[in-house]
Amino acid sequence: MGYPRRRSFSLKKLLIPLLVLIIGAGIWYFSTGDGGEDDLVDLLNSPEESKGPYSEWRSRLKAGESRAVAKDVLSAIEKGDVKSHPELLWIVAEAWGKAGEEALRRSALEKIIVEFPESVAATRARSELSTTTSGDGIALYLDGKYEAAKTALAVQLEKSPEEEKSSILWHIARCEQELGQARLAREHFKRVLNDYGDSLFVADSYFGLALSEFSEGRYDSALEYFDKGRAADRTSAFGLRSAKDMHELLYVKLVEDEKSHSMWEPLREMLCVLWDAADEDERTTLEQKLDEINSYVVFNPNAEFADAVFHTVETGDSIGKIAQKYDSRVRLIKHINGLDSDMIYPDQRLKVLVGNSKLIVDKSAFRLKLLFNGKYVHSYEIGIGKDGKDETPVGEFRVKTLEVDPIWYFEGEKILPDDPRNVLGTRWIGLDIPSYGIHGTPFEDSLGKKSSAGCVRMLNQAVEEVYAFVKRDDVVVIRD
């Protein structure tokens, strides 16, 4: 009877030191700076991020290509090839550290804290910076103790090397902004831009200036600075927060109260930034604003915007030649310019949209959303397939066929476009899944419900507009 008790006691004695050992190993793992970085990056990355460029960058980092990796990652983020996130910036910080660029490493760590304050990487970054005055100042800034943070950072600014000053100046400017010291904040943001034009804080300095201008009612210049920030870094989390702070009042001032169109295009860019990051409920509200703006910016033949060029017709031109020159399409040129025929004349000015379309079909909302170069253009009500064998499929597809006044083949019969039994309407956008596509209908009461045999149906006028935008191999995403 005594043996089991002795065994229980022995297990307890073994388990306690084992738990202490495991906890101690965990503390060492997350606190040591020696050799833990690669493992931390692997831990933070998702399975998708362990492939492609992420895996390549880590391999090159281990091979000693530190400086090149840091520059390549930053370049990929700036171009939009990859989305900025804390793990990518951690790779940048690690690469600069291995390259011996301590100031640049510190700037990258600070960028993680500013952009992604709730992330695991930010917790680690705070720990690594906590022994420096700069780190203390940032911690105070993140705690909302702006006066104390400004004082601590000002002391560090006097002692720091040139490579560190862009980060410190930016944080000082943000403290001043929160303290209502707009003039001083502007001076420090501009100093970052003028003296440290290749630093990680250029884009966020533009966004800081945008907020300063906005707070003083200079809405046009606020949008101009925001646009410059977007050009420098399209993925900045601080830029997104700035847009959230500004967009509602900007819409009221520039669209609802004042019908001047001069700043509608940069406001559209800001709203598209928010649309990308929003959930479906937020998107509905944003889409109402964007529909008003796009009615002018996109569809007015005289309005300039980033995805359009203007072509002055010369002798010998045709719409086909112009479409080919800009990799556009005849039907889109005609639609945007309100042309009923292919006839054009010398010196005529035509607006040409350049880029690719994407369609997003949201089955639960019975909406189709048209994007051009990744930016929202318009939303349309749709009908979808009935439940069961007629259900509309979900997935990512490609446009494969485009037909005007399509013939409907049903149960072996060829039903012509002018036959009232033809359910395909005036346009057919066929997908790379047999017998499925997007088509027109004259029956408005069949929209907003499950009414088809599997295809997506739209009013004829709506499908004709979407048809003008799409071309073969454009992406169509259908989701529940």
Image (spheres, helix red, strand yellow):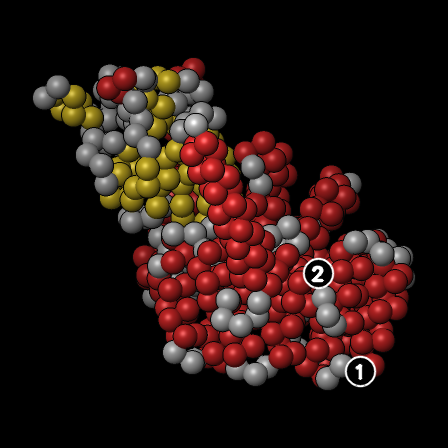
Q: Which mark is residue 207?
A: 2
Real-space Cα distance between discs 2 and 1? 27 Å
When the figure is inspected, residue 345 is found, relative to residue 455, above or below; the finding is below
Give the residue displayed 65% in from the left and 67% down from the top.
128
| Left/right of residue 434 with respect to residue 476 in the rendered view | left
Circle 2 — which element? helix
When the figure is inspected, residue 51 is found, relative to residue 99, above or below; the finding is above
Type of amino acid at the residue the image marks with label 1: Lys
Q: Are the two marked residues, 2 and 1, in contact with CB atoms closer than 8 angstroms?
A: no
Mark 1 — residue?
159
Give the residue displayed 37% in from the left and 35% down from the top.
478
Image x and y of residue 459, in percent: 41, 26
Type of amino acid at the residue the image marks with label 2: Phe
Instruction: For residue 153, say whether it is visible.
Output: yes
The one nearer the camera, 469 or 242, is 242
Circle 1 — which element? helix
Image x and y of residue 61, in percent: 43, 74
When the figure is inspected, residue 418 is found, relative to residue 207, above or below; the finding is above
| Left/right of residue 254 with respect to residue 426 in the rendered view | right
The one nearer the camera, 370 or 53, is 53
